[in-house]
Structure formats: C-alpha cells, structure tokens
Amino acid sequence: MACEGTANDEQITEAIMMRVVKDELKEVKAEIVPPLPEQKPLDAKDEILTSQLAQTIKIIGDDLVKHKTLNDTIDGFAKKILGNPKDKGIYQKLVMQVFADGNINWGRIVVLFYTIAKLSGKMLLAHLPGPVTEMISWTLNYFKEHLLSWVLKMGGWICSIASIACFRIESLPSLYPPEHSALPVLGITLFCGIVLGGCVVLWLGKGKH
C-alpha cells in the first residue's frame, strides 16, 4: 500500500499529541487540569492509526524516562518556566531547539511530544495551568507551520509506523538555548523493538471495507 499524506494528517497530529499529553496527566487531579484543545472526531481508520501511534509513543516515552540527560534538560526548562511563568519564550526555545539544525525525523517528533507532555505534567503539579494551555496551543501551531509539510512529504502518519516502531535518535542537538551551547550535546540512541504488524493488518483490513 503506497503512503500518501492527506489533510487528515493535521487532525491526526492534534489527536496524537493530545493523547500523549492526557496520558501524562492521568495521575494529576482533574480539578487542576485546564481545558485542553478540543478535537474533531476521527473516522474509523484514522482512529485506529492514532490510537496505535499514541500507544507506541507512550511505550517509547517509558524508555526515554531512563535517559538522564534529556530529562535533566526538561527539568531545567521547567524550573525556568516556574521562575517566570509569563515568559512564553522559554518553552518556545525548547521546542525550536529540537529542530534547530533543520533536521526533521520521526524520532525528533516523538521527542517533541514526550517533552511537551512532561512539561505539562510538571506545570500542573506546580498548579500553573495557564502555561500548559499556552504551551500546547503554541506547539500545535508550530507543528502545523514547520513540521506538517514534512509529515505530508513523507507520506503522512501512516508512513511513520515502521520508523517509529524501531527508530534511532543520534546526535540530537542540545535542547538548551544557544547561550548554553557549551553544555554537552544530547545524544540518544534508542532501538525500540515494538511489533506493529497487527496495526498494519488491521489498518489494511479496514481499508478494504
């Protein structure tokens, strides 16, 4: 089956990001979770793809928790936001730094989702719902403006399955702002042996009906 990106990929992007964020926030008390961006219903095929990719990113995220450098970086940015919650530029720098060298790949997109979810959780635990809403909305807009065209060029989210199921992130640029460039560059190598054959079969089966 040939991959072909569609307008649905924008909606799928929003759905995946929100599911990853909501999974991170499931342990947070409901009363401190702010209203999150509403999502339009997905059709049956897109729902299958979205659910499987969100679950796969969660599994990868469970492994990324073990990578101290990445999580120390996220903690550093969280402290900066907590110190100045009105400064929107802090998390914007973090997001842009992931793709600062212009290199986009599925692995970095997974790291982006993981990072936003972790930051959202830390902000809510500190009872700062405002930055969470702004951060998610800004990141979704950033994705649409700077990353979605790459996703479509790659054939859309359906073509991400193999790469995300077993991907490698090498020489990921430091997530620190340029003024901290002297700090060690973050390099993560991650092999994820997740089998998504069932998802692909189910997807193809649905497509025949």
Image (cartoon, rainbow, N blue to C red):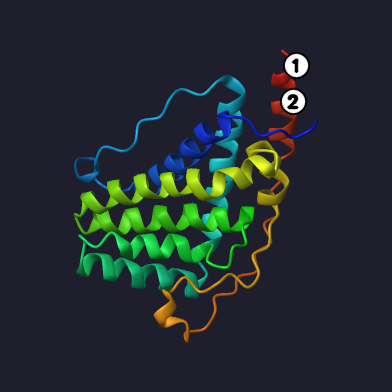
Residue 184 x %, y %: 52, 83
Q: Nearer the viewer, residue 122 or 94?
A: 94
Residue 41 x %, y %: 46, 22
Image-quadrant location for residue 160: top right
> How far apart are the two marked residues, 1 and 2, measured between alpha carbons?
7 Å
Q: Residue at x 51, y 64 (%)?
A: 98
Decide: is 209 above or below 21: above
Residue 73 x %, y %: 42, 72
Q: Amino acid at mark 1?
A: Lys
Q: Nearer the viewer, residue 44 or 1?
A: 1
156 vs 144, left or right, is: right
Q: Residue at x 20, y 45 (%)?
A: 32
Q: Amino acid at mark 2?
A: Leu
- Which residue in the structure is indicated by mark 2? 204
- Which residue in the structure is indicated by mark 1? 208
Name the element at disc 2. Answer: helix
Name the element at disc 1. Answer: loop
Q: Residue at x 57, y 34 (%)?
A: 9
Asked whether disc 1 touches disc 2, contact meaning CB atoms under 8 Å apart, the reply is yes
Decide: is 128 above or below 31: below
Q: Residues within 10 Å of mark 1 (few under 14, many from 20)?
A: few
189 vs 84, left or right, is: right
Q: Residue at x 20, y 54 (%)?
A: 128
Q: Nearer the viewer, residue 102 or 66?
A: 102
User: Quick one: quadrant of the N terminus?
Assistant: top right
In this view, which residue lies farthest toward the top? 209
